[in-house]
Amino acid sequence: SQKIEQNSEALNIQEGKTATLTCNYTNYSPAYLQWYRQDPGRGPVFLLLIRENEKEKRKERLKVTFDTTLKQSLFHITASQPADSATYLCALEHNNAGNMLTFGGGTRLMVKP
Amino acid sequence: KAGVTQTPRYLIKTRGQQVTLSCSPISGHRSVSWYQQTPGQGLQFLFEYFSETQRNKGNFPGRFSGRQFSNSRSEMNVSTLELGDSALYLCASSLTGSRETQYFGPGTRLLVL
């Protein structure tokens, strides 16, 4: 069966350090992968999209990698700040069926000052 | 540009009742997707509409239905409510579909008693 797995345990890091979140998937052949941020009681906010032919993508302090061989994406936040504390979700197109995004369970990041 | 709006923001219903939720996408967006989010199951895809047609449907019972109007506004309906339908219902809009940024609304928090 198809699965998207993110570490369900909260990730606690110190301000200024790099946070690394993992998204693993099985039985998908995604053409692209997206990362979203969600704050409590709010809808997810789009952060980055990376395509299968892109190994890495950056946006300010954010970096995403996409390894289709390992079936894994890593999401990095450098020089983390308490304001980065949120839940981060990865999302894949469902089984190559257009217009159906499947989300991972999300990882909660806590950045302590 | 105004963001995605959802009404109502909060709703309390009792078992057996039905409910209708509304979503107004960003102007010019033709794709509207609906998701259910619960602590146990995470974000789950309900259905997606494009140009008034349902293009994809997730694995939910027939009690969950939706429609899209000519102005791209969308409604979802849940009939014969069950306790397990208590959740945050999110809609997301995009220009044409899931292969691009999804813009989420703030959600409707539904509590079924």
Image (cartoon, coloured by chain):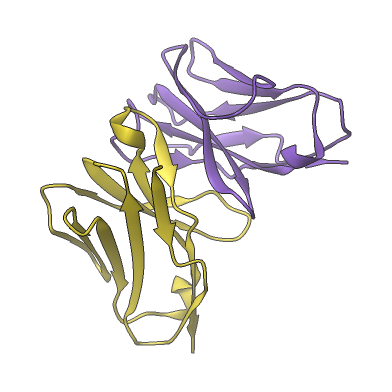
Residue B24 found in image quarter: top right
Q: Is residue A107 left or right of residue A74?
A: right
Which shade is chain A? yellow
Q: Residue at left 44%, top 72%? A: A84
Q: Is residue B35 above or below residue B31?
A: below
Task: Tell me the quadrant of the picture where the C terminus of chain B can be found.
Answer: top right
Q: Is residue A97 above or below residue B90?
A: above
In the image, residue A106 lies at what x, y percent? 48, 59
Which shade is chain B? purple
Residue B101 found in image quarter: top left
Q: Residue at left 39%, top 26%? A: B29
**Between A75 and B26, which is closer to the camera in this rendering?**
A75
**Between B96 and A94, which is closer to the camera in this rendering?**
A94
Residue A16 found in image quarter: bottom left
Task: Tell me the quadrant of the picture where the N terminus of chain B can be found.
Answer: top left
Q: Is residue B19 above or below residue A91?
A: above
Numbered marks: total: 0
In the image, residue B93 lies at what x, y percent? 44, 32
Q: Residue at left 46%, top 27%? A: B32
